[in-house]
């Protein structure tokens, strides 16, 4: 699905790379659709990561680094890469409704 | 149609991209660029294969990995005369300063970084010739080393990869 089609389906603004423009627009339903788009069926472990990322964002005003996720969400590196294969940094941020990650670690 | 294709290409990463990193230097300030780039690549879904050779072997040698140092002598980035660099204790000071800064940024130390990139799926190889030169066996190397391979073998493994020599 193209970004434009996805945008129409979800009724939220997406940037050209498919990230939510406004993190406040995010809902769990949007996460389900975006995950499906990435070929991911969300399980409780996925939600554990997503909830951590959302909470962190609410608290700090910026998305956590992947390192912060693996250190503090209870989901270790190996599992995070299994849950969000082929590039967890962008996938986690996108599904959790945050912008494209900018950190280095 | 074209627009749609571009959008797809941007969000997806179907094409496998591989980054080969050759680490030939064993100082602390030469270890980090490779580790940071390897990790960044994995975070983006890029395949990573690291090849440690010559002084780079220190980074994956069990009894050396925790004692990597920043050497001010001959290091133009240190902004100090080489003569100052030879004063006893300067290397220790520079090393301690770098380690403190790294920790402040929540960047892992080298042993933990190796574990992190390996857990993230980066493959770690030691150079056969360097291992033989230094009398090192697999047991002398950190757990994350996948194998000891020859240079030809590594180049075969990384055919079509983008290559980085550090």
Image (cartoon, rainbow, N blue to C red):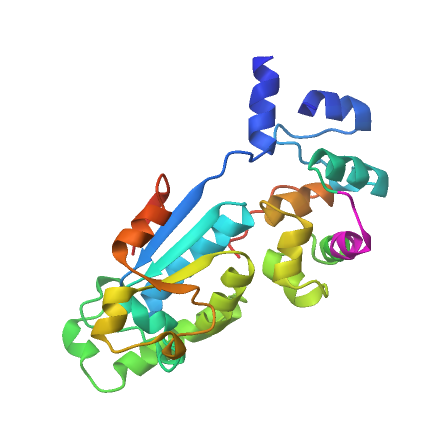
Q: Can you give x and y, in whole percent of width and height, for residue B129 in the image?
A: 23, 66
Q: Nearer the viewer, residue A43 or B87?
A: A43
- Classify the position of the C terminus of chain B by image quarter: bottom left
Left or right of A85: which side holds B132?
left
Compared to residue A94, the image places residue B88 above or below, namely below
Left or right of B40: which side holds A80?
right
Does A50 appear in magenta?
yes
Q: Can you give x and y, in whole percent of width and height, for residue B103 in the image?
A: 50, 72
Q: Nearer the viewer, residue B106 or B21?
A: B21
Compared to residue B15, the image places residue B103 above or below, namely below
Q: Can you give x and y, in whole percent of width and height, for residue B151 in the image?
A: 26, 56
- Identity of the residue furthest to the top in this view: B1
Magenta residues, dominant SS class? helix
Q: Can you give x and y, in whole percent of width and height, for residue B110 in the image?
A: 44, 71
Q: Residue at x 24, y 68 (%)?
A: B130
Compared to residue A6, the image places residue B95 above or below, namely below
- Classify the position of the N terminus of chain B by image quarter: top right
- Identity of the residue furthest to the left in this view: B83
Q: Quadrant of residue A78?
A: bottom right
Q: Residue at x 55, y 50 (%)?
A: B43
| Residue B79 shows in the view | no
Region rendered in magenta? A41-51
Q: Quadrant of residue B79?
A: bottom left
Q: Nearer the viewer, residue B153 or B39?
A: B153
């Amino acid at each position: 699905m193209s970004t434009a089609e996805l945008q129409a389906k979800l009724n939220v603004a997406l940037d050209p790379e498919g990230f939510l423009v406004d993190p406040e627009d995010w809902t769990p339903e949007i996460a389900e659709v975006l995950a499906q788009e990435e070929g991911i069926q969300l399980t409780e472990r996925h939600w554990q990561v997503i909830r951590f990322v959302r909470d962190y964002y609410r608290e700090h005003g910026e998305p956590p680094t992947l390192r912060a996720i693996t250190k503090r969400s209870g989901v270790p590196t190996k599992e995070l890469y299994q849950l969000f294969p082929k590039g967890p940094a962008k996938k986690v941020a996108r599904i959790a409704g945050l912008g494209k990650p900018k950190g280095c670690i | 149609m074209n627009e749609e294709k571009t959008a797809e290409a941007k969000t997806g990463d179907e094409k496998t991209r591989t980054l080969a990193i050759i680490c030939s230097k064993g100082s602390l300030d030469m270890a980090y660029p490779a580790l940071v780039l390897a990790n960044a690549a994995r975070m983006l879904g890029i395949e990573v294969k690291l090849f440690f050779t010559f002084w780079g072997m220190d980074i994956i040698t069990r009894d050396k990995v925790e004692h990597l140092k920043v050497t001010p002598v001959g290091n133009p980035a240190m902004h100090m005369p080489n003569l100052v660099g030879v004063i006893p204790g300067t290397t220790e000071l520079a090393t301690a300063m770098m380690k403190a800064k790294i920790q402040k940024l929540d960047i892992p130390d080298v042993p933990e970084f190796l574990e992190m990139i390996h857990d993230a799926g980066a493959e770690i190889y030691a150079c056969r010739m360097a291992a033989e030169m230094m009398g090192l066996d697999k047991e002398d190397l950190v757990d994350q080393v996948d194998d000891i391979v020859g240079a030809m073998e590594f180049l075969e493994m990384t055919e079509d990869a983008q290559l980085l020599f550090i």
